[in-house]
Image: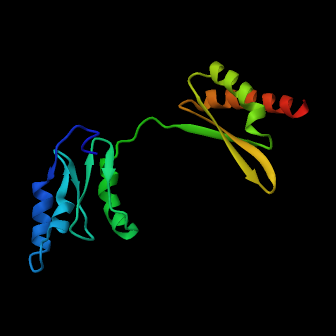
Amino acid sequence: ISKAFKRKYEYNKEAYQILERHYKDSYFNEARKKMAKMPRGAGLIYNPSSSAAGFYVKNVFTLPGVPSILQSMMSFVEQLIIGGEKVYSVTVQVHLPESKIGKDLGKLQKKFKDLSLGSYPFFQSGKIGTALVVRGYSEKRIQECKIILEKILKKIKKS
């Protein structure tokens, strides 16, 4: 993360002090000290379950992998997350292989450049299929695309 943001990887003074206070009666060894290392200027994510803080740099959050500890830190993280524009999506599942619909899907994507079209093959109950997902910021545009997509799929099934 430090490399990605071109920041020095160093001990965070506040995180170090929190750990130092926590381990005052036991040995504050190098492994424990490492828990205070993070990119320069990172914000702390306080940890009410243990003394090891998480951190964030811009929109990247680094948290522990232990579910109960992670959960105890989420109320603080939620305050930091800034919501963006809502993304809408619709999924159409069809029992056709991706290879049969790829060309038409490409043409449809050119018509709806403001939307994201994805195809995800699946194998279910002995049948091959594809889940087609349309995503974007306009519900109206997604519905317009879905109607055309369903017509295309109907035509392909008949051929």
Residue at the limit of the structure toward the top, as seen here: 111
Within the image, what quadrant is residue 1 found in? top left
In the figure, 1 relative to 116: above or below? below
> Is 130 left, or right, of 12 in this rendering?
right
Reply above or below: 52 against 127. below
Q: How is the image coloured?
A: rainbow
Total numbered circles: 0
Q: Residue at x 9, y 80 (%)?
A: 25
In the picture, residue 52 is in which quadrant?
bottom left
> Which residue is found at the position 63% from the left and 31% from the top?
142
Counting from the top left corner in percent of width and height, residue 154 is at: 84, 32
Q: Position of residue 64 (x, y in %)?
A: 33, 62
Q: Is residue 157 left or right of residue 28?
A: right
115 or 16: which is nearer to us?
A: 16
* Depth check, front residue: 8 or 13: 8
Q: Quadrant of residue 29?
A: bottom left
Q: Position of residue 138 (x, y in %)?
A: 56, 29
Q: Position of residue 61 (x, y in %)?
A: 32, 50
Instruction: Relative to 54, say whether 48 is above or below.
Output: below
* Residue 18 relative to residue 61: left or right: left
Q: Residue at x 90, y 29 (%)?
A: 159
Nearer-the-camera pick, 99 or 104: 99
In this view, the residue farthest toward the bottom is: 25
- Furthest toward the right, the residue is 158
